[in-house]
Amino acid sequence: MRVPVGVKVGAFSLLVMGGYAYFANSIPQIESKPPQELSLEGGSVTPAQLVRAGEEIFKTKGTCEICHRIGQKGTRAPDLAGIGGRAGKARAGTSATQYLVESLLQPGALLVEGYPNIMPAVDKPPIALNRSELWALTAFLQSLGGTVDVVLADIPATAGAAGPGGAAAAAVKVPGDPAAGAAVFAGKGTCIACHKAGKLGASPVGPDLSQIARIQTPEYIMKKILDPAALGTVAGYPKGVMPPTLGQSLTAREYTDLVAFLLTLK
């Protein structure tokens, strides 16, 4: 008895699919988890361990690589190659450790010439590093051309602490519609002409905004739309390109929708 060709093809297909299914299920599955908070207080930790932990924070939770590079020019923020050695000479009377800690907690007080005041305090949202993470990150920065000698006592006890009463800072909620904001970004706001935001746009005229909510506060984003010149121009991009009239051309609803959309870019 002859087996119809269709039956043969179907059986072969099932066999192939079964093989793929078996192969796929034999691969260990990786569960995606949010980054765990690092806690080193009260523990014994070597400088080498601190540096390793700090490098991981630099590349992940600290989001430093979004703006900074090590040994590469032309990025949004200063090149950090050799910062551990340069930090001790950056300001008279300030040690390398003091300079690095202050640059993380009060970056606006230590602006590098040619770069605008756009770096947020990393112990505050949206980055929100805790005291242990600040300690490790400082150690990593010291390792870039300097001596790793930072101790926990060099990090203020209040750094990375919760708000008054022990409560964490409340997230800013904007009463806008992100989907409508994406339409404003691509349409009336003409943002897409200069910026990329996730899957929207591709223009290199302005900074890539695909992760803007990971590195900037809602207050910065809201003000940048209304008064772009007041916050300076990101290094490496032309000045005066972003229109200062969006606050007049967009309705209140369009503005809040646009902000809501930008706050999803993480």
Image: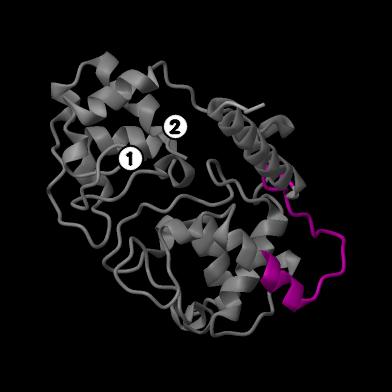
Q: Which residue is mark 1?
A: 197
Residue plotted at (33% across, 60% down): 76
Res. 134 mark: none
Please give the range of residues in magenta. 29-53
Tell me if residue 256 can be seen: no
Give above or below for 72 relative to 116.
below
Residue sitting farthest toward the right = 43
Residue plotted at (35% across, 37% down): 221
Q: Is residue 186 left or right of residue 26?
A: left
Reading the chain from its start, which is encountered first: label 1 or label 2?
Answer: 1
Which of the 4 quarters of the picture holds residue 147?
A: bottom right
Residue plotted at (65% across, 72% down): 139
Say few, some or many: other residues with alpha carbon within 10 Å of mark 1 (under 14 / 14 to 19 / 20 or more).
many
Tally the marks.
2
Across and down, in percent, residue 32 comes to 67, 43
Across and down, in percent, residue 262 comes to 37, 33
Say few, some or many: other residues with alpha carbon within 10 Å of mark 2 (under 14 / 14 to 19 / 20 or more).
some
Tell me if residue 173 can be seen: yes
Q: Which residue is mark 2?
A: 264
Give above or below for 261 relative to 87.
above
Q: Is residue 95 magenta?
A: no
Give above or below for 93 relative to 196.
below
Across and down, in percent, residue 122 comes to 54, 52
**Which secondary structure dominates the residues rendered in magenta?**
loop
Across and down, in percent, residue 175 comes to 41, 16
